[in-house]
Image (spheres, coloured by chain):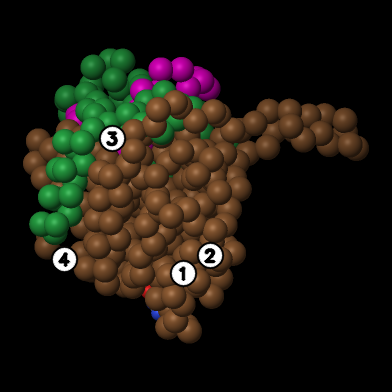
């Protein structure tokens, strides 16, 4: 297999430049499956990754899909998304099951959600 | 798009996955974990509406390793690659399936990546049962509900009892046999996980952290 491994070939310098060296504060709100929706179109002069995210998320798009498409580690994408959320350029639809805070132990999902998943799977 | 059959590795710019509906607002996760070559990607591909995509997460731990010659603390980067697929369940719910190797560094990132997961499928190859001991151990420790799915590689048939014993599987954990190449069979594995969750007892006291 010679699948590309996104991010692996990126030098730390490139990743540093992408995020302006900012740390991950505020980016923890984004779950892998938080759905991102663009609230505006890209504007000229915008950082190309930001513009790419806005183009990609005209329809709801999960954080992990954005990471795969940009070929960037999820943690870097979370920082880029925090920028866009902070300036109101995207909105975020967070999962309704237990999520968010890292190091949380397992919580059983809502029974209504489980029923909806079951129905959805059976209808496939 | 109505076909779930697609080629991994096709990489044209116009090969963008079909968009979700604008009403989609609830992402859900199931993790398929198992040893190398056990059929994780195959299972994701069988049920996914998009070709499996691949991404990774990196976490840097500062100052763990010390380089003797220079006497400087170096940074160790933990990188975990995983692939995933997607199933639109209804107007609101979208299920993401993650295929991930159960090696040690993966569990280091579990909380960061997979907190809030509905549950897990441990995919096993009956010819290499020991490969899945570690994953089962970690999931039990973490308190994440799971089912064990034996992928059929055409080897000698094992009875469920034999597999249970070899895995030291608690009675309450469902064991199913599957063919990851089949959409119906993979779907059944996911359904057995959800049914297991529906019957899962609510914990009285939270599990102590590892
Ligand atoms: N006979 C048989 N072969 C299978 C089955 N599932 C997967 N395979 C084959 O086994 C090989 C490995 O499958 P993958 O889906 O790539 O396994 P994986 O767990 O994703 O592998 P890694 O990501 O490399 O750890 C492929 O050649 C599949 O076609 C199965 O149910 N029966
Ligand atoms: Mg694989």
Residue B28 point in image, percent of width and height:
27, 40
Above or below for A93 versus B93: above
Above or below for B145 versus B189: above
Reading the image, the residue beneath label 2 is: B165
Q: Nearer the viewer, mark 1 or mark 4?
A: 1
Residue in the image at 54% along x and 61% along y:
B167
Q: Which chain is green?
A: A
CA separation in Å, label 1 and label 2: 6 Å
* Marking on residue B3: 4
Q: Nearer the viewer, mark 3 or mark 2?
A: 2
Membership of A29 in magenta stretch: yes
Tag 1 and tag 2, C-beta contact below 8 Å: yes
Q: Which residues are magenta?
A: A21-38
The chain that hosts pointer 1 is B
* Marking on residue B161: 1
Q: Which chain is brown?
A: B
Reading the image, the residue beneath label 3 is: A109
Above or below for B81 versus B65: below
Sequence-first disc among 1 and 4: 4
CA separation in Å, label 3 and label 1: 30 Å
Membership of A108 in magenta stretch: no
Residue in the image at 40% along x and 51% along y:
B172
């Amino acid at each position: 297999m010679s699948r590309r491994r996104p991010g692996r070939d990126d030098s730390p310098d490139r990743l540093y430049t992408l995020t302006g060296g900012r740390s991950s504060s505020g980016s923890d709100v984004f779950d892998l499956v938080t759905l991102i929706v663009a609230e505006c179109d890209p504007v000229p002069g915008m950082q190309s990754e930001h513009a790419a995210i806005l183009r990609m998320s005209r329809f709801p798009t999960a954080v992990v899909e954005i990471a795969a498409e940009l070929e960037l580690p999820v943690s870097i994408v979370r920082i880029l998304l925090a920028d866009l959320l902070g300036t109101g350029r995207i909105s975020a639809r967070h999962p309704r099951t237990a999520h968010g805070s890292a190091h949380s132990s397992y919580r059983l999902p809502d029974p209504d959600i489980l029923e909806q998943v079951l129905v959805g799977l059976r209808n496939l | 798009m109505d076909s779930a059959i697609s080629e991994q590795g096709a990489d044209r710019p116009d090969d963008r996955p079909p968009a979700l509906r604008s009403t989609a607002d609830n992402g859900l996760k199931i993790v398929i974990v198992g040893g190398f070559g056990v059929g994780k990607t195959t299972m994701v591909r069988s049920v996914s509406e998009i070709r499996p995509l691949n991404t990774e997460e990196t976490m840097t731990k500062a100052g763990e390793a010390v380089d003797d010659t220079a006497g400087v603390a170096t940074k160790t980067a933990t990188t975990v690659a995983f692939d995933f697929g997607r199933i639109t369940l209804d107007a609101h719910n979208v299920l993401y399936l993650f295929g991930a190797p159960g090696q040690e560094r993966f569990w280091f990132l579990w909380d960061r990546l997979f907190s809030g997961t509905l549950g897990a499928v441990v995919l096993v190859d009956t010819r290499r049962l020991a490969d899945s001991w570690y994953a089962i151990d970690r999931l039990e420790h973490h308190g994440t509900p799971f089912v064990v799915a034996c992928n059929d590689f055409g080897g000698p048939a094992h009875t469920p009892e034999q597999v249970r014993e070899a895995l030291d599987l608690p009675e309450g954990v469902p064991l199913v046999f599957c063919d990851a190449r089949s959409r119906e069979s993979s779907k059944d594995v996911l359904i057995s996980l959800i049914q297991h969750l529906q019957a899962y007892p609510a914990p009285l006291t939270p599990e102590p952290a590892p």
